Amino acid sequence: MSTVAPRPPFAAALAAGPLVLDGGLSNQLEAEGHDLGDALWSARLLDEAPEAVVAAHLAYFRAGADVAITASYQASFEGFARRGTGRRRAAGLIASSVALAREAARRADVARPLWVAGSVGPYGAVLADGSEYRGRYGLGVAELERFHRPRVAALAAAEPDVLALETVPDVDEAVALLRAVRGVGLPVWLSYAVAGGRTRAGQPLEEAFAVAAGVDQVVAVGVNCCAPEEVAEAVTVAARVTGKPVVAYPNSGEAWGPDGWTGDTTFAPARVGTWRAAGARLIGGCCRVGPGAIGEVAGVLGR
């Protein structure tokens, strides 16, 4: 019978690191033949094809990932309401993202412990208009906190090991998210989307990471959904400013535009040693980084 290996608290495991994070959930779902052309993106499959979500997580666990990020990145009460889904049902779907990742961990049946990170994407992701890569939505910190708090609560109720506050484009939203997670009883990591050595909204990385420096609930800081070339500098700054373990999970290096993904892949396992030396303790991939690449990362990290 399949079992799940006992797992220590996530913060302790991360401090001992390194841990291998999964890759892009959306590209794995698309590789399995699922159309994600919807404002809810992968969160739509929480309702329509939950077994597909389990299979995608399982592919990463079997490739060597220690941590899976849930399919809740683009999930919100407002987004589900636009599809006619009531609030109670929406809360259940958000919570189910954790259960599906746990089921994948059970089926993986490996000797090593496996963790589940509940994904909390930025406000711009819910708009489904690309604004998560720009930030500056015209909303203040208090408004953003009010938006995020209910979805954080629904996700936290399912008891993931950690909350991933990810692809955050600017400091205002980071502050709002850190306020929204107060009192939920879970550790969090804070991960910015960056470009040109700054947040997507243009703030210096020193300023961005400083908002988490004195927050005990934050067990890691870092970057995701960026070019691999951005990671080394960002990891160095994050470790220096906060003294915390760093998380790094960039995209493949291809560029997204009107014609889809273009350009060459620059995500290379050879970069992983540099990231680890700079302070990264949780390393994986984001968009267009699949199980094969994560398996190579696991090999480099000796997992």
Image (spheres, grey):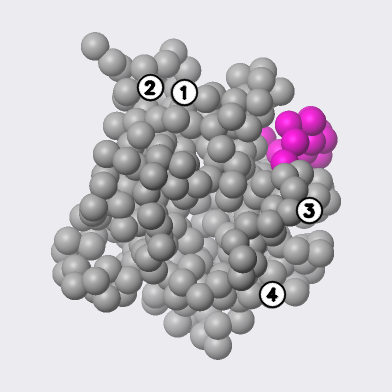
Q: CA distance from mark 1 to mark 4?
A: 36 Å
- Mark 1 belongs to which amino acid? Arg
Q: Earlier in the sequence, mark 3 or mark 4?
A: 4
Q: Is residue 72 above or below residue 113?
A: below
Q: What kind of element bears circle 1?
A: helix
**Residue most toward the front?**
259
**How packed is label 2: few (under 14 Cα within 10 Å), some, or many (20 or more)?**
many
Spot occupied by residue 148 in the image (x, y as percentages of width and height): 41, 69
* Residue at the spot 76% in from the left edge and 44% down from the top edge: 266
Q: What kind of element bears circle 3?
A: helix
**How packed is label 3: few (under 14 Cα within 10 Å), some, or many (20 or more)?**
some
- Mark 4 belongs to which amino acid? Ala
Q: Which dot marks residue 230?
A: 3
Asked if labels 4 and 1 touch by Cβ distance under 8 angstroms, the answer is: no
Q: Earlier in the sequence, mark 2 or mark 3?
A: 2
Q: Which residue is mark 2?
A: 108
Asked if labels 4 and 3 touch by Cβ distance under 8 angstroms, the answer is: no
Q: Earlier in the sequence, mark 2 or mark 1?
A: 1
Residue 182: image quadrant is bottom left
Q: Which dot marks residue 62?
A: 1
Residue 219: image quadrant is top right
Q: CA distance from mark 2 to mark 4?
A: 39 Å
Spot occupied by residue 141 in the image (x, y as percentages of width and height): 53, 79
- Answer yes or no: is residue 123 visible: no
Q: Quadrant of the N terminus?
A: top left
Q: CA distance from mark 3 to mark 4?
A: 15 Å
* Residue at the spot 63% in from the left edge and 57% down from the top edge: 261
Of the two numbered discs 1 and 4 in the rendering, the one whose residue sits closer to the viewer: 1
Q: What kind of element bears circle 4?
A: loop
**How packed is label 4: few (under 14 Cα within 10 Å), some, or many (20 or more)?**
some
Q: Which residues are magenta?
A: 267-282
Q: Which residue is mark 4?
A: 201
